[in-house]
Image (spheres, rainbow, N blue to C red):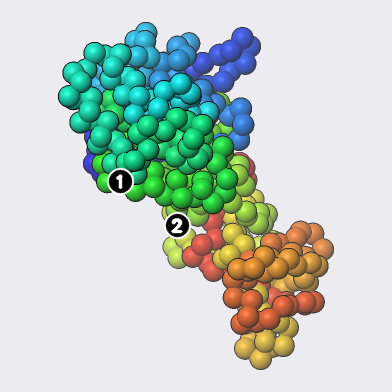
């Protein structure tokens, strides 16, 4: 992927529906050959942006560029940005071959070329032998593959997808998204994918744009979004997090010390601009905490945050604990090695993986 070459550029884009501001002056660069996911809760603006790029809506302000050409006022069928809907929208009276070939026939493509291009799509999506089946004779995953093939057969380098996997069962959803990601990487087309599923976004994306209330809160790699969220909303929406409020009591070029009630937590310095006495929030993921029994603590002289387990839940691959600290807050801890320590109860001490503790200023909450 060439991250320097931008295929779609959005500048200061806005869109209203009556008095409702669905897109609030958004700017976004989409590199060629990347897999970008637009992630956020329902009504946050992600689908509206996708439809603006596709040409189904016209913006009230701002500009959309495709390969440096302005798209505003250009009808959808001339934009080279095919969109796959979550309903698939396959023609029930056409078989698989005819569904995939539909757009090519509309453009009066020569018959021999249609056969070559449709054949290539059938092979790419594992649909060989299903050419004569109708949509009702296909599984949900097979229908989805036909929808992808119909979009990509037009020879475009961009594929827009509006929650295309939401109608699949959990197992099929994982299989199809893995296939989609593998195809995108193999053939290098640019994918813009809308979802509200955090796991889905983290697993298939090169970059994620997190939306809230018509604005983009943060754009970054899955690791950046998960471990270095810029706001509390991003940290809370993407995965599970403990939010530890505290005050900066000491810092130098290497570490920052934050006092939270009776505990002092040390955070590595990562170019944080803080000052003594400043209120901050520490983002601590449940899997970045280890817990030890009280007797282990005394024997090994471990230093950490002391608490009391109030409940736990066995989830197969892990045990999730809820730990009360200082009578003021409850931490969530995920133990992925339950056989090592056994099922814990009562007083424990939590030890944090300092490298994965992230600091957010209170003002950026």
Could you tell me residue 151's position as x and y percent? 35, 28
Residue plotted at (30% across, 13% down): 106
Residue 34's quadrant in the figure? top left
Q: Left or right: 316 with respect to 3?
A: right
Residue lying at the far bottom of the rendered structure: 299
Quadrant holding the N terminus: top left
Could you tell me residue 54's position as x and y percent? 40, 20
Q: Report if residue 219 is visible in the image.
A: no
Circle 2 sits in a helix, a strand or a loop, which is it?
loop
Q: Left or right: 204 with respect to 343?
A: left
Circle 1 sits in a helix, a strand or a loop, which is it?
helix
Q: Nearer the viewer, residue 129 or 348?
A: 129
Compared to residue 80, the image places residue 7 above or below, namely: below
Q: CA distance from mark 2 to mark 1?
A: 32 Å
- Local crowd size for mark 2, using a 10 Å CA cut-off: few (<14), some (14–19), many (≥20): few
Could you tell me residue 155's position as x and y percent? 25, 28
Residue plotted at (47% across, 60% down): 269
Quadrant holding the C terminus: top right
Residue 157's quadrant in the figure? top left
Q: Which residue is mark 1?
A: 185
Residue plotted at (56% across, 66% down): 288
Q: Left or right: 304 with respect to 39?
A: right
Q: How many marks?
A: 2
Q: Left or right: 121 with respect to 333?
A: left
Compared to residue 353, the image places residue 294 above or below, namely: below
Residue plotted at (47% across, 14% down): 57
Could you tell me residue 66's position as x and y percent? 29, 22
Q: Nearer the viewer, residue 73 or 79?
A: 79
Pick whichever of labels 2 and 1 is earlier in the sequence. 1
Q: Which residue is mark 2?
A: 270
- Local crowd size for mark 1, using a 10 Å CA cut-off: few (<14), some (14–19), many (≥20): some
């Amino acid at each position: 992927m060439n991250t320097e070459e931008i295929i779609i550029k959005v500048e200061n884009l806005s869109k209203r529906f009556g008095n409702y501001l669905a897109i609030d002056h958004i700017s976004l660069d989409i590199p060629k050959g990347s897999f970008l996911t637009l992630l956020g809760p329902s009504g946050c603006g992600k689908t509206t942006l996708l439809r603006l790029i596709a040409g189904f809506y016209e913006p009230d302000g701002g500009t959309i560029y495709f390969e440096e050409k302005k798209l505003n006022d250009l009808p959808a069928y001339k934009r080279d940005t095919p969109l796959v809907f979550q309903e698939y929208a396959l023609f029930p009276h056409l078989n698989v071959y005819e569904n995939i070939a539909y757009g090519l026939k509309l453009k009066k493509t020569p018959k021999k070329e249609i056969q070559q291009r449709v054949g290539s799509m059938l092979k790419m999506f594992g649909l060989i032998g299903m050419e004569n089946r109708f949509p009702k004779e296909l599984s949900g995953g097979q229908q989805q593959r036909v929808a992808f093939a119909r979009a990509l057969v037009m020879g475009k380098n961009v594929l827009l997808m509006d929650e295309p996997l939401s109608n699949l069962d959990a197992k099929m959803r994982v299989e199809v998204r893995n296939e989609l990601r593998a195809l995108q990487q193999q053939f290098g087309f640019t994918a813009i994918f809308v979802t509200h599923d955090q796991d889905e976004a983290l697993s298939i994306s090169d970059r994620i744009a997190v939306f809230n209330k018509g604005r983009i809160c943060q754009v970054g790699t899955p690791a950046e979004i998960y471990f270095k969220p810029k706001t509390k909303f991003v940290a809370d929406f993407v995965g599970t997090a403990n939010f530890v409020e505290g005050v900066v009591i000491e810092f130098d070029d290497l570490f920052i010390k934050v006092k939270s009630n009776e505990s002092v937590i040390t955070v590595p310095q990562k170019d944080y601009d803080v000052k003594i006495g400043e209120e901050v929030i520490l983002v601590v993921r449940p899997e970045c905490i280890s817990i030890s029994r009280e007797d282990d603590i005394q024997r090994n002289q471990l230093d950490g945050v002391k608490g009391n387990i109030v409940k736990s839940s066995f989830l197969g691959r892990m045990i999730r604990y809820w730990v009360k600290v200082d009578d003021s807050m409850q931490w969530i801890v995920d133990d992925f090695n339950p056989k090592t320590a056994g099922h814990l109860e009562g007083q424990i001490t939590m030890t944090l993986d300092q490298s994965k503790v992230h600091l957010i200023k209170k003002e950026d909450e």
